[in-house]
Image (cartoon, rainbow, N blue to C red):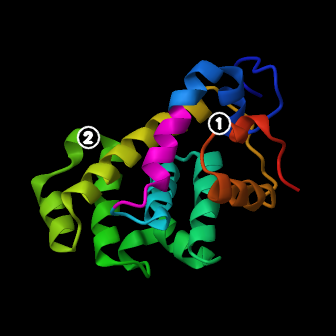
Amino acid sequence: MPHIDFKNDLPGIRSALAYSPETAAPLGVLAEILLRSDEGLTRAERELIATYVSYLNDCFYCHHSHGEIACIYLDGDREIIDQVRNDFSTADISEKLKGLLRIAGKVQQSGKAVTTDDVVHAKNSGATDKDIHDTVLIAAAFCMFNRYVDGLATTTPKDMSSYPLRAKQVAEKGYGNHIYTEKQPA
């Protein structure tokens, strides 16, 4: 049961966004910039970073939501998403992404946990300064988003069939106010 009365029955972050449209707008813009930019990292890589950090934070709603969005960008390959969650170092992903996930995992613990060695490793694996910047910002933002969702005890759908439907909508339309104003796709 949510800690506050959201005055809606939407799941996850959607309920908090609908409750507070004035904070929803900048959060939506931030998510759009971080997760849908075509500069540097791919959308799939961006969503995998969000999924991984959300998994480390034990935010069920977010790691399943963003895992499903990544799945769309990966042409339905859920195996890669499970590999990233379980042990990204052995996942069928690029060495560059492995280096970036290493950094993301450190950011999830503390920004100060990221070392020069982590950055050098990522760069030696093909990451650019922009890739590293965006990874740190995605990881930091998802710590905030995860705590927003779980700190207010938003409702988390256990019906896994609902996640791909919303993911398709986000992949097609992005992170706008439709997230909390439009009904769940059927």
Q: Which residue is mark 1?
A: 13
Q: Foreground mark, 2 or 1?
A: 1
Q: Quadrant of the C terminus?
A: bottom right
C-beta proximity under 8 Å, tags 2 and 1 = no
- What residue is shown at x 22% (from left), y 73% (from top)? 126
The 10 Å Cα crowd at callout 2, few under 14, some 14 to 19, many 20 or more, is: some
* Position above or below: 34 against 5: below
How many numbered circles are shown?
Answer: 2
Residue 132: x and y, percent?
A: 25, 55
Q: What kind of residue is marked 2?
A: Gly
Let me know if residue 161 is in the magenta part: no
SS state under label 2? helix
Q: Residue at x 51, y 45 (%)?
A: 32
Q: Upstream in the sequence, badge 2 or badge 1?
A: 1
Residue hosting label 2: 111
State whether residue 147 appears in this view.
no
The magenta stretch spans which residues?
27-39
Q: Nearer the viewer, residue 183 or 162?
A: 183
Residue depicted at 61% across the width and 69% down the height: 71
Residue in the foreground of this view, choosing between 139 and 91: 139
Q: Is residue 130 left or right of residue 89?
A: left
Left or right: 81 with respect to 68? left
In three-dimensional space, the C-alpha distance between marks 2 and 1, rounded to whole angstroms, equals 24 Å
Of residues 95 and 176, the one nearer the viewer is: 176
Residue 29 in view in this figure: yes
